[in-house]
């Protein structure tokens, strides 16, 4: 994030000198590749953000064969029920309702909570968060983020409340929970519903309490890119008996029994095969988290001391999934932009991602509906312009991380060298 906007505390680790490889080049200001870094991935492979973790394949296939033998493929089968029980136990809530994906989970939770009119949420989130509201003709009111956490700023939330406001949707980002207590206080004082998009925060805690039990409800994602996945899936978790009852009706067309529909609903059911994958992922969850934490530490060591590069830090006193490796590029200090570094990484088959670029407010239909929103979201705009998310998970090892960080280091060295040459030329003229 630009220096004048950046107030956040970031990871500090000891320098680990692993030696240098030959310097390469970056994309020029026009986005044209001059030459690659000379650090091509081993065996010509590519590295992706969110490459799926698989877990115990033998155990997964046992479950799939059992599903086929039973011929019970959907409609609240035994694996779906077990998956719900395991999640509720892990999170520490009374109710878990698994659904076909996280977006449908948000849509059902929004409808079950009776949200209408306007709902306040951050623009710095995946667009599905906003779409889940707009899809139901609820106006998303975009709020700026706290520059220290990149999550919704409670101080700005209160300024946006109007008589049409029915709720607040907080988003836990990169496994770091948002300001739960402050948002809860605002919601209570103004009589608003409070829903959390917890797609990034499964298995994480806040002040020692597992994410999932905050607000009226929270929604998880088990998409293939999440560290615990169900191929495709999601879950709504809550401590409200009445809300859980309504959600269960709504995810199954409103049926309470054969030929007996008592509520408006949709088809949000999770298939048995997805639940089987979810259960298999849960069994390897601690292992996945250990690998993610190892990768996080190594990235910290490799990136430490690089000018203009900041690794987003996690509170290690809390439980965390460490599933996102997030760096911020300060162009003034680094001498190169986020886009130039990302271009160099991609030229070397490292598919680094921009999260969440350019922000929901700059995507349709929101940029047409709210053309001036960016003027009220300076920290959101700054974060969108400087963040890169790097590969991690079980598909990445120490050699891969050293290679990826070496590409970044080479890009910074080339930028510094180019700046020195420009300085010498200007001095001579």
Image: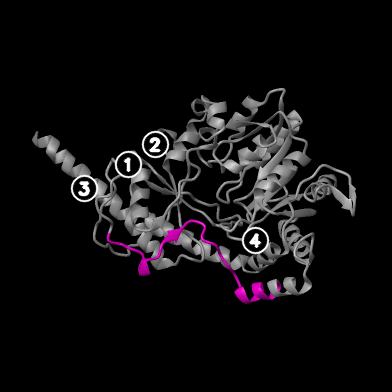
Residue 320 occupies quadrant: bottom right
Q: Nearer the viewer, mark 2 or mark 3?
A: 3
Rounded to the nearest angstrom, the CA distance separating label 4 from label 2 is: 40 Å
Residue 39 place in picture, x, y as percent: 31, 62
Q: Is residue 95 above or below residue 152?
A: below
Q: Nearer the viewer, mark 1 or mark 4?
A: 4
Given contact means CB atoms under 8 Å apart, are the residues at marks 2 and 1 in contact? yes
Residue labelled with disc 2 = 3
Residue 140 place in picture, x, y as percent: 63, 32
The quadrant in which the N terminus is found is top left
- Sequence-wise, the earlier of marks 3 and 4 is 4
**Secondary-structure class at tag 3:** helix
Rounded to the nearest angstrom, the CA distance separating label 2 from label 1 is: 9 Å
Rounded to the nearest angstrom, the CA distance separating label 3 from label 1 is: 14 Å
- Sequence-wise, the earlier of marks 2 and 1 is 2
Q: Is residue 215 above or below residue 379?
A: below
Residue 321 occupies quadrant: bottom right
**Secondary-structure class at tag 2:** helix
Residue labelled with disc 4 = 230
Q: In the image, which residues are magenta?
A: 38-63
Residue labelled with disc 1 = 333
- Sequence-wise, the earlier of marks 1 and 4 is 4
Q: Is residue 55 magenta?
A: yes
């Amino acid at each position: 994030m630009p220096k004048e906007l950046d107030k956040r505390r970031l990871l500090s680790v000891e320098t680990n000198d692993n030696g240098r490889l030959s310097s390469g080049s970056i994309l020029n200001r026009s986005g044209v590749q001059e030459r690659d870094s000379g650090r091509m991935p081993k065996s010509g492979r590519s590295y992706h953000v969110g490459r799926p973790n698989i877990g115990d394949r033998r155990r997964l296939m046992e479950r799939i064969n059992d599903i086929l033998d039973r011929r019970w493929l959907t409609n609240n089968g035994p694996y779906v029920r077990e998956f719900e029980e395991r999640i509720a136990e892990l999170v520490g809530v009374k109710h878990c309702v698994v659904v076909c994906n996280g977006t449908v989970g948000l849509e059902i939770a929004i409808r079950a909570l009776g949200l209408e009119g306007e709902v306040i949420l951050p623009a710095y989130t995946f667009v599905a968060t906003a779409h889940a509201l707009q899809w139901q003709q609820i106006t998303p009111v975009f709020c700026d983020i706290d520059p220290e956490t990149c999550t919704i700023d409670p101080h700005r939330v209160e300024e946006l409340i109007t008589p049409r406001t029915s709720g607040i949707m907080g988003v836990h980002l990169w496994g770091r929970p948002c300001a739960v207590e402050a948002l809860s206080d605002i919601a209570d004082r103004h009589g608003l519903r409070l829903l959390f998009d917890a797609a990034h925060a499964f298995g994480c805690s806040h002040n020692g309490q597992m994410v999932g039990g905050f607000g009226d409800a929270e929604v998880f994602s088990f998409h293939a890119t999440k560290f615990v996945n169900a191929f495709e899936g999601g879950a709504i978790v809550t401590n409200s008996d009445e809300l859980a009852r309504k959600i269960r009706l709504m995810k199954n067309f409103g049926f309470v029994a054969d030929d007996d529909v008592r509520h408006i609903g949709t088809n949000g059911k999770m298939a048995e095969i997805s639940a089987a994958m979810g259960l298999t992922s849960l069994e390897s969850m601690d292992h996945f988290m250990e690998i993610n934490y190892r990768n996080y530490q190594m990235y910290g060591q490799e990136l430490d001391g690089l000018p203009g590069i900041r690794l987003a830090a996690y509170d290690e006193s809390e439980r965390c999934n460490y599933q996102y490796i997030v760096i911020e590029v300060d162009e003034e200090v680094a001498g190169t932009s986020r886009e130039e570094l990302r271009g160099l990484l991609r030229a070397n088959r490292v598919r680094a991602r921009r999260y969440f670029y350019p922000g929901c407010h700059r995507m349709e239909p929101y940029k047409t509906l709210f053309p001036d929103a960016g003027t009220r979201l300076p920290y959101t705009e700054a974060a969108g312009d400087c963040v890169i998310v790097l590969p991690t998970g079980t598909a990445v090892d120490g050699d891969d991380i050293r290679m990826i960080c070496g590409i970044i280091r080479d890009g910074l060295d080339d930028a510094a060298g180019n700046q020195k040459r420009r300085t010498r030329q200007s001095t001579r003229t």
